[in-house]
Amino acid sequence: MQIPFDNSYARLPDAFFASVEPTPVATPSMIRLNFQLAETLGIDRDWLESPDGLAVLSGNQLAEGSQPLAMAYSGHQFGGFSPKLGDGRAILLGEVRSEDGTRFDIQLKGSGPTPFSRRGDGRSALGPVLREYIVSEAMAALGVPTTRALAAVTSGEDVFRDGRVPGGVFTRVARSHIRIGTFQWFLARQDHENLKVLADYVIARLHPEARHSENPYVALLQAVIERQAELIAHWMQLGFIHGVMNTDNMNVSGETIDYGPCAFLDVYDPEKKFSSIDHQGRYSFSNQGSIGLWNLTRFAETLLPLIHDDQERAVAMAEDVLGSFFDLHQAAIERRFTAKVGLGKCEQGDWNFVKDLLAVMAESNADFTLVFRHLADTLETGKSQAFIRLFKSPDAVGEWLKNWRNRLKDVDQDEAVALMRRSNPVYIPRNHRIEEAIEAGNGADFGPFHRLNDVLQHPFEPRPEFVEFESAPEPAEVVQATFCGT
Ligand code: AMP
Ligand code: MG
């Protein structure tokens, strides 16, 4: 077998998925392969690069051992419940185990219609394929739990979105593609039997420690809450806005999933949102923790029938666990943000101190990433001009800088610099750079796409040859709207 498949999801009851084969594309062509990831999955590099590899990764041929299927799921989208979503343009080819035994899904996106494609064509435009490749691999390099990119290909066919655009197929790898919405699928159908099958499957595959707990389903809820509390704090540390935190886009593995209208902040604005259809700011930067809890509450609802036969008892037990989310999330934020200013231990008053800086940044429309990088330079070199220049006036931040120097007096300076360096990336996938790569890619020039991917593989390491990727966009370069990436 070229891909060592072992497909556990395909062994679940029929109600979990629809078997469906990818629909071939006209003239596929490889854009980029992720050899490092392929190696951890036990997939041979020579085969991947061969015409057979391309045929599999474009959906034109089925690999031996593959049992292609579209997963069933529901979801709350912008607060409204859709009982029938499912993989409408994605097909799970199968699962493999990495060297350390971890099970991974291999999924094609844009591989043609499935029984869950309602209005759509099951295809993907090239733009979202390139965006997901860039951002998911950048997130991985930044250390954020995320789905991964194994390959991106052009299909040689156009798709119709706002107009005619080139199509692509993306190969996604994840510890699973099970979402809160997968649980909601069975709750919406009052199928408690399969709800239990799903929960037991998720515990065995993703949260095995929960099995030994007094109540494994409460422990499952707790485990997912812990992962999400930390994950969302990690996003915020880096200025990342997911953009469309629907319950079908929240993976119970704790991996970031669905890179549609997502983006990293340039200017710091806590109210910033990126989805052009998010009129209420439901998924804005600073609302991500609250919406995470909202989604986890929907998850808890699906587990109630499993937690206890007595509904009231079940609710009380679930509420108890849900109540831990905010403390966990807040503690993670405080730890991550105080590290950004060089403080390894968060002491009394330190979080307020960070909040003061964030307030000044918002006041000054300062660039989120540059502020923290230049702050580290300030400590290392003693020169603060570049930092101060990011603010409206020297007075705006002078008082804060003085207090910060004072606070850092008791701290080992080298350690503080090192902590800041590894908490504050030099390179993030800035939206204008992604757009630039997509625009060139739509004209069949993948140079900018490759260059951006290359620089983002080492986001914490300044390199003079990539200096232009550090900068914030010029006013004319700022991307005005990010649409849902279908
Ligand atoms: P997403 O925007 O990726 O969260 O997708 C929401 C739902 O729309 C999922 O059920 C997708 O499978 C479905 N969908 C998105 N784009 C397409 C498409 N081009 N064809 C068919 N279904 C789609
Ligand atoms: Mg989705």
Image (cartoon, rainbow, N blue to C red):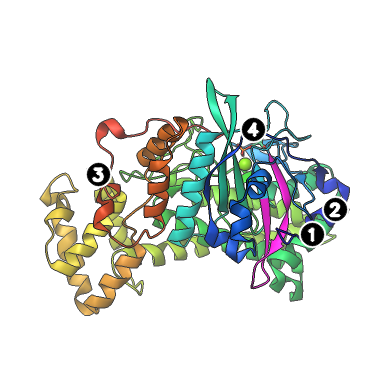
N-term mark: 2 or 1: 1
- Kindly report the distance in space between the C-alpha atoms of the residues bearing marks 1 and 4: 26 Å
Label disc, if present, on residue 123 of the rendered structure? 4
Dot 2: few (<14), some (14–19), or many (≥20) neighbours within 10 Å?
some
Residue at point 24%, 50% (across, down)? 360
The residue at which mark 2 appears reads as 194
Q: Secondary structure at mark 1?
A: loop
Residue at point 22%, 76% (across, down)? 413
- Kindly report the distance in space between the C-alpha atoms of the residues bearing marks 2 and 1: 15 Å
In the rendered view, tell whether residue 215 sits above or below residue 197: below
> Residue 287 magenta-drawn?
no
Disc 4: residue Cβ within 8 A of ligand 1's nearest atom: yes
Q: Nearer the viewer, mark 2 or mark 4?
A: 4
The residue at which mark 3 appears reads as 363
Image: magenta residue range: 90-106
- Kindly report the distance in space between the C-alpha atoms of the residues bearing marks 2 and 3: 52 Å
Q: Position of residue 60 (x, y in %)?
A: 70, 40
Q: Secondary structure at mark 2?
A: helix
Q: Nearer the viewer, mark 1 or mark 4?
A: 4
Q: Report the front residue among 92 and 472.
A: 92
Name the dominant secondary structure of the magenta segment: strand
Label disc, if present, on residue 184 of the rendered structure? none
N-term mark: 1 or 3: 1
Q: Amino acid at mark 2?
A: Asn
The residue at which mark 1 appears reads as 8
Q: Amino acid at mark 3?
A: Glu
N-term mark: 2 or 4: 4
Side of 184 where 419 appears, left or right: left
Side of 2 where 363 appears, left or right: left
Side of 198 where 340 appears, left or right: left
Q: Position of residue 162 (x, y in %)?
A: 53, 21
